[in-house]
Amino acid sequence: MGEAVRLYLGNLPYAVDEEQLAALFTDFRSLTSVQLVRDQHTGASRGFAFAELDDEAEARAAVAALNGRTLAGRVLAVKPARPKQEFGQPGGGAE
């Protein structure tokens, strides 16, 4: 096993929850977490989430198996997550 791989899950149905998302990964035993992104004020789903897997090969297989799959009438977008942007980087506006 190597470093954990974080995947972006987009175009999610707004009614989906973390348990339903984790169920998509039942064939991928290295899943360690699923985090549904919610609105800070309302708590409603923002339509995307992140999943983390401990095995890079399984993460690639999950992308291949789940990207383009339909869930509750929506075509999922599953791909490697981009690195988080750090605050205070150039171009921020505040000095």
Image: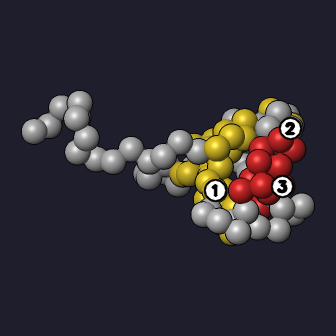
Q: Earlier in the sequence, mark 3 or mark 1?
A: 1
Q: Which residue is mark 3?
A: 24
x and y, in percent, of residue 13 in the image: 73, 41
Name which residue type carries label 3: Leu
> Distance from label 2 to label 1 (Cα)?
20 Å
Q: Residues within 10 Å of mark 1 (few under 14, many from 20)?
A: many
Residues under numbered marks 3 and 2 in contact, where contact means CB atoms less than 8 Å apart: yes
- Examine the image and state in which quarter residue 63 appears: top right
Looking at the image, residue 17 sits to the left or right of residue 94; the answer is: right
SS of the residue under disc 1 = strand
Looking at the image, residue 19 sits to the left or right of residue 71; the answer is: left
SS of the residue under disc 2 = loop
Name which residue type carries label 2: Arg
Q: Residue furthest left?
A: 95
> Distance from label 3 to label 2 (Cα)?
10 Å
Residue 5 — which label? 1
Q: Residues within 10 Å of mark 3 (few under 14, many from 20)?
A: few
Front label number (2 vs 1): 1
Residue at 25% over, 41% down: 89
x and y, in percent, of residue 17 in the image: 71, 57
> Distance from label 3 to label 1 (Cα)?
16 Å
